[in-house]
Amino acid sequence: FIRKKLDRATLDELEELLIAADLGIDTAASVADAVGKDRYDKEVTPEEIRGIVASEISKVLAPVAKPFAIDAEKKPFVVLMVGVNGAGKTTTAAKIAAKAKRDGKSVMLAAGDTFRAAAVEQLKVWGERIGVPVVTTKVGGDAAGLAYEALARAKEEKTDLLLIDTAGRLQNKADLMAELEKIVRVLKKLDPEAPHATLLVLDATTGQNAVNQVEIFGKIANVTGLVMTKLDGTARGGILVAIAQRFGMPVHLIGIGEGIDDLQPFDADTFARAITGAN
Amino acid sequence: MFESLTGRLGDVFTKLRGRGALSEKDVDEAMREVRRALLEADVALPVVKDFIDKVKARAVGVEVLKSITPGQQVIKIVHDELVEMLGGAVDTSISLHAAAPVAIMMVGLQGSGKTTSTAKIAKRFESRDKRRVLMASLDTRRPAAQEQLKILGEQTGVATLPIIAGQQPVQIARRAIEAARLGGYDIVMLDTAGRIHIDEALMQEVAEVRDVAQPHETLLVADSLTGQDAVNVAQQFKDRIGVTGIVLTRTDGDGRGGAALSMRAVTGVPIKLLGTGEKLDALEDFKADRVAGRILGM
Ligand SMILES: Nc1nc2c(ncn2[C@@H]2O[C@H](COP(=O)(O)OP(=O)(O)OP(=O)(O)O)[C@@H](O)[C@H]2O)c(=O)[nH]1
Ligand SMILES: Nc1nc2c(ncn2[C@@H]2O[C@H](COP(=O)(O)OP(=O)(O)OP(=O)(O)O)[C@@H](O)[C@H]2O)c(=O)[nH]1
Ligand SMILES: [K+]
Ligand SMILES: [Mg+2]
Ligand SMILES: [Mg+2]
C-alpha cells in the first residue's frame, strides 16, 4: 500500500468523492472534517481512508437505522405509502406485504392510486402472486374514499396489516399534497391513530431534491419513516446521509431489486461501506 | 425546475453587476459561489469543474478587463457557456427522416417515465403532425406494464400492438415492426422495460431489441431529479445501445435540474424533450437558450 499524508489536499479530494456520491456539499465537508479530526497529517493507506470514511458515515446513519416494526396490538396496523412518481411505492408495498405474509400475518393491500394508468392492475398482479387481497375502486375514483373502505374492511376481517398505496406526486404540487392530507383525515374517522406508519419512498438515484421530498412530505403527510429503493447495482443514495444529518428521520428498509424478496432492513454500516467502497 | 438555481446564481450576479473594475480575486470568489450553486443543483462534479475553468479563462481575459461593465460581461460569459453546455442551437426535433415505419425506441432506468413519455410523444405525432403511430410495450417484467401502455393508447386514441402473453421483448419488437408495416403506420414506438445501466443481462437484452428494430431514434428517458449518477447512466446507455436524444421528465418538480446540464455535457447527446407533468399533453420541446435564460433569470 502507498501511504499518504492525511493533509488538506487529500481531504479536499475526499470531499469531492463524497460530493460525487450525492452527499451534498455541506455533508461532504462535515464528513471530510470528521475524518481529518485527530488524524490530520497522519500517514494512512487508501484502504484505511475508506474504512475511516465509512465509519464516519456510519456514525451519522446509525441513529436513524430503525427496523420496521408492525405493532400487533393495532388491528389492523395501517401503513400509508407516499412519495414522488416512480419512486417504487407500489413495488415496496407488495414487498412488505409478502414479508408480513411469510411471517404469518394476515395482510390486505389497498390500491389507492386511482390516477395512473394500470396502477390498480399492477397492485392486483402483485396481490395475486403473493396471495393477498387487494381492495380497489374505479379509475378516477376518490383515493380517500377507497382508503376508508379498505380500513373498514380490514377492521371487519380483523386483518393484521393494511398497506395503502397512493399515487405518485411531486411535493411542490399543493393540490396533490392536500389529497394526501385528506386520506389521513378520513382514515382517522375510523381509527384516530391511523395511519400507524407513513412510509416515504425515496429513489436512490435522486440527488439533492430528496431533501425537499423529506421536508415537505414529512410536514404534510407526517412521514414516520423512510424506505430507499433501487439500491441494487451502483453505490447510490448518498443523499440519505445528508437527510439523516438534517432530519434524523428513521430509515427502515431498502429496495435492492424488482423482485418480491428484494427488500432488506436498513443497516448503517453496510450502507456506509457500499457508498465508500470499503471492505 | 431550475427556479432555485436561478435564485442562487442571481445572488452571485447581483454582487458582480454593480462592480467597476474586477480583480482576479473577485472572479475567483464569484466562481466559488457558482460552483456551489451548480453542485447543489446536482450538476456532475467533473462538469462543474470544466465549466468553471472555461468561464474563468474567459473572465480574466481581455474581453472582461477592457469592458466598461466587467460584471455584466462575466454574466454574459456564464450565460454563453451555459447555452453551450446545454447544447447550443442544435436541432432538437425528433427525426423522422427514414423509411416508414420509423422506429423510435424508449430506454431508461426503472420508473423514469418511459411509458408515459411514449404516450405523450405518440399523441403529439398524431395530433400535431398528423402521423399514424403504433405503440408497443416490450416490458414483460413489470406487472401490468403492457396493460399501462394499452390504457394510455385508449386515452390518447393511439393504436397499441395487441398483447400476446408469453412473448419476449425481441419477438414483440419484430411483431410490432411487422404490424406497423402491414398497417401502413408512419411511426412505431417501442417502450422498453426499465433497467439499471450496469445490469449486464438487461443491457444485452435491449441491445438485441435494437439490432432487430434498428431504431431511427433511441430516446433515453431520464428523471430531472437524478443526482450525480446521471452522467454514468447517460454514458452507459449511450455506449451500450446508442442514444440519439434525451427526454427529461418531472421538470414540473422543484428540482434544480443539474442532471440536464451534465448529461448533455458529458455525452454530447442532445436533450430533445421535457416532460412537464403527469398529463398526456405535458410535453415541451427543449430549447437550450430558453433554458439557459431561465436558469439565469434573464
Ligand atoms: N432496480 C430496482 N427497481 C425497483 C426497485 N423498486 C422498484 N423498482 C422498479 O421501479 C419502477 C417503479 O416502481 P413502482 O413501484 O411502480 O413505483 P411507484 O412509486 O409506485 O410509481 P408511481 O405509482 O407511478 O408513482 C418499477 O419498474 C419497479 O419494478 C428496486 O429496489 N430496485
Ligand atoms: N410529475 C410528472 N410525473 C411524470 C412525468 N413523466 C412521468 N411521470 C410519472 O412518473 C411515474 C412513472 O412513469 P412511467 O411512465 O410508468 O415510468 P417508466 O419509466 O415507464 O417506469 P418502468 O416501466 O417501471 O421502468 C408515473 O407516475 C408517471 O405518471 C412528468 O413529466 N412529470
Ligand atoms: K425515478
Ligand atoms: Mg405506484
Ligand atoms: Mg414503463
Image (tube, coloured by chain):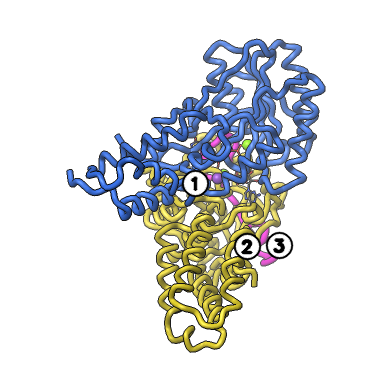
Instruction: Please tell me whether residue A208 belongs to the stretch shown in magenta.
Output: no
Q: Of the residues under marks 3 and 1, which one precedes in the sequence?
A: 1
Measured as percent of width and height from the top left, residue A152 is found at 78, 18
Drawn side of residue A159 relative to residue B200, left or right: right
Mark 1 vs ligand 3: CB below 8 Å: yes
SS for tag 2?
Answer: helix
Q: Of the residues under marks 2 and 1, which one precedes in the sequence?
A: 2
The chain under label 3 reads B
Measured as percent of width and height from the top left, residue B84 is found at 49, 73
The answer to which of A165 and A207 lies nearer the viewer is: A207
Q: Residue at x 48, y 89 (%)?
A: B66
Question: Which chain did the image draw in blue?
Answer: A
* Kind of residue at badge 1: Leu
Question: Mark 1 — residue?
Answer: B109
Counting the numbered discs, the total is 3
Is B106 drawn above or below residue A228 in the view shown? below
Is A253 drawn above or below residue A88 in the view shown? above
Question: Mark 2 — residue?
Answer: B7
Bounds of the magenta segment: B121-145
Which mark, residue B30? none
User: Mark 1 and mark 3 in contact (Cβ < 8 Å)?
Assistant: no
Graded by Cα atoms within 10 Å as few (under 14), some (14 to 19) or many (20 or more), the crowding at tag 1 reads many
